[in-house]
Image (cartoon, grey):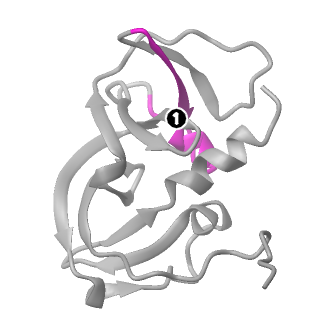
Amino acid sequence: MAMDSSAKPAMVAASGQFSTFFVADLFFGVDVLHVQEVLRSQQMTPVPQAPDVIEGLINLRGQIVTAIDMRRRLLLPERAANHPDSMNMVVRTADGAVSLLVDEIGDVLDMDASDYERPPDNLTPAAKELVRGVYKLKDRLLLVLDEERTVDLVVGRSV
């Protein structure tokens, strides 16, 4: 049976541990098994003619890693001048390690699949495209980031 590769994957209930981070007022989680490491701000090497979402390249102990600015990826305003430097959440994808530049790192949270829901309709189109689902917490939503989709849309463009 042929699969339609253009169709958005069906919502799959995700349970387990999520490494969390903030981008502006959005609270995201990535499956902890896909996180390679978390780093403070790193020296960036610019990439001429790269898409705007690519901040640059970082050298991670000899491994060259593309850094994606999540604010730009989500079409959000730039960080305020008085805001501390971004943090790097290095995630492993099918194409290798990629650094997601985020505002702040959160905690690792244990979530139950029974609390998993579809993304709300009021997310911006840019966020909705990257979010697989959500968990309702006491004071906010945990948006489950689809790191493959986040990277695929960038990798698909010519760098």
Which residue lies at the image location 31% right of the left edge and 26% below the top edge?
A: 84
Magenta residues span 62-80
The residue pinned by badge 1 equals: 96
Which residue lies at the image location 75% right of the left edge and 31% below the top edge?
A: 51
Mark 1 neighbour class, 10 Å CA radius: few under 14, some 14 to 19, many 20 or more: few
Looking at the image, residue 49 sits to the left or right of residue 146; the answer is right
Which residue lies at the image location 39% right of the left edge and 56% below the top edge?
A: 25
Quadrant assignment, res 108:
bottom left
> Can you give x and y, in whole percent of width and height, for residue 41 in the image?
35, 20
**Amino acid type, label 1:** Gly
Whether residue 63 is situated above or below residue 113 in the rendered picture: above
Residue 68 painted magenta: yes
Quadrant assignment, res 86:
top left
> Can you give x and y, in whole percent of width and height, for residue 38 in the image?
28, 33
Asked whether the viewer can see residue 21, the reply is no
> Can you give x and y, in whole percent of width and height, for residue 37 in the image?
28, 33
